[in-house]
Amino acid sequence: MLRTHTCGELRAEHVGATVTLAGWVHRRRDHGGLVFVDVRDRNGLTQVVFDPDAAPAAFEAARDVGHEWVVAVDGSVRPRPAGQANPNLPTGAVEVVASALRVLNPARTPPFEINREQAVEDGTRLRYRYLDIRRQRMQRNLVLRHAVTAFIRAHLNARDFLDVETPILMKATPEGARDFLVPSRVHPGRFYALPQSPQQLKQILMVAGIDRYYQIARCFRDEDLRADRELEFTQLDLEMAFAEAGDIMALNEDLFVALVAAVAPHLRIRQVPFPHLTYADAMERYGTDKPDIRFGLEMVDIGPDVAGSAFRVFADTVARGGRVKAIAAPAQFTRREIDAFEAFVKGLGAAGLAWLAFDADGAVRGSVARALAAPEIAAIRDRTGAGDGATVFIVAGDAPVVALALGRLRGELGRHLDLIDPGELAFLWLVDPPLFEWNAGEARWDSVHHPFTSAVPEDVPLLDTDPGRIRAQAYDVVCNGYELGGGSIRIHERDVQARVFALLGLSDAQVQAQFGHLLTAFEFGAPPHGGIAWGIDRTVAILAGEANIREVIAFPKSLSAVDLLTGAPSPVPARDLAVLGISVVASSPPDATDA
Ligand code: ASP
């Protein structure tokens, strides 16, 4: 090695040793006739002192080096002078007195500073990702990500799971997104699809007798990007034969608990065992299937209190089958704040935001304080549990609009009132979601999870009569308002699977073409099985305290789906396309991938 120690290694016990360090010039200071250079590698940094009397050539060389040059330094370790030790730095007790400095490679002036945390525009960070990764934030996040995947592997290996790789060039798998297609050269006009997940292959592995499978799998979905979405993402993919939903949830719950203790012990899990919330309950109380339960502010149905009201807006909503729901916030708000909340819910489709404030002296104020009768107000107060000084916010409308608007307002209020403890992880299992939802546009049922999910056994007869009421044997794991992932007990009987495909509007020919392999496999002794997949990117982001998953991915795409480092996607020479039997009929402008 070109070094004897890393830059994070030297301690008081090394005093007197002759060492060679190699790394990047983190910072240089000329001070009292001496030059100080902090040399950095990913293990840490070490202060190196250049003394013109002791080593004149090294001193001269050190005066020339710039930030981020790569250098090697020979020298000896000594204690820092009295009063100059740095207790915040692991190597802070010592320094290296240099005898020689070799420049291994100079560097251009970096487009942003590596040696301090500063806001840098995202595009610049991605274009110079290798510099961005040198910075502390990305170093810390990548180390954490490694710790997470290493822990998961060790945990599952110890429980008899087999890590099996599945192909990247596959047949299309329906997870509800668009596929990335890869043209076949050998078979012009035919395409592989990049897997949206290894779903069918992991089920086929169960038929193959690999009764505990996992893979830290890359998945590809051609969707519009946002803060929590990348074109490709990584998930822990897992499947078990002879297991029931409770077994899969328990196994993953143990994994999460052990993982947090091992890699993020400063975070507290709010409740173990994780609470189970039905889909219906979550929608009713939080207006979403991925609630953040680190705080209360639950939604309450006040329909019964206003159904007979002279205030027509509420009464009419109830009469037409809509909902009138409320949240009691333990605070008073200014008119400006309330106007901002109203604009927020209107942006989500609500007609308006009504409110009632209960002053400590018994007075009631608010937009509907006069419109509602006193007993109605008393009933609302009673049902929402609003105390003195509380404000009740009310949204009326169709159920989905009320759920969305009031559910999001709940999140706004939680943040506004500082009710969210960032040191807490509120995991929960969301259970009993519907198996299907009606797709009015296409006049057919759609799977809510995916078409391989089985029904709760007592609901199976509804396949023929009322598919919309069937509950799925599915579960999502939710944490702090994010859906980390989900899974289900699968259909393992060929005929049931065929009936589900039929409900989804697939013809026999389509089923045969798309899923014939799976149905055939099911004819050869498919064991009952189920599994789950959850996002590594989002999990690491939550553990790292990052809002955006790009902060925990080494080389993410920009929000416009471009790899700013390499410039992908890029045009391909016509002759390469000709080999594939492809001609381009529409193309983006030449600079489309610059931004
Ligand atoms: N394949 C599913 C997904 O990627 C997860 C599962 O059902 O195991 O969302």
Image (cartoon, rainbow, N blue to C red):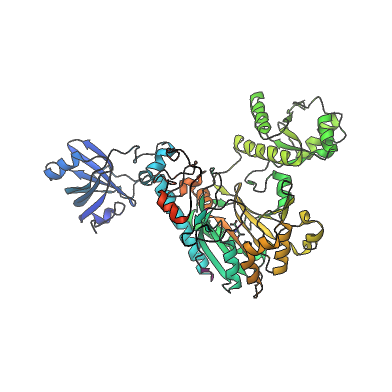
Seen in the image, is 483 located left or right of residue 404?
left
Which residue is located at x 24 percent, y 37 percent? 29
- Split into quadrants, the picture shows ligand 1 in the one at bottom right
The reply to whether residue 434 is in sight is: no
Q: Position of residue 10 (x, y in %)?
A: 28, 53
User: Quarter of the image holding residue 369?
Assistant: top right
Seen in the image, is 20 located left or right of residue 378?
left
Which residue is located at x 44 percent, y 52 percent? 577
User: Quarter of the image holding residue 517?
Assistant: bottom right
Q: Position of residue 307 (x, y in %)?
A: 85, 36
Q: Position of residue 433 (x, y in %)?
A: 71, 54
Quick check: 226 above or below 269?
above
Which residue is located at x 34 percent, y 41 percent? 114
Q: Which quadrant of the rendered structure holds the N terminus?
A: bottom left
Quick check: 141 above or below 187?
above
Of residue 311 and residue 389, the one placed in the foreground of this image is 311
Magenta residue span: 159-180
Q: Residue 140 magenta-drawn? A: no
Q: Position of residue 128 (x, y in %)?
A: 37, 42
Predominant secondary structure, magenta span: loop
Of residue 505 and residue 397, the one placed in the foreground of this image is 505
User: Quarter of the image holding residue 135?
Assistant: top left
Of residue 441 and residue 40, the one placed in the foreground of this image is 441
Q: Residue 172 magenta-drawn? A: yes
Of residue 566 and residue 348, the one placed in the foreground of this image is 566
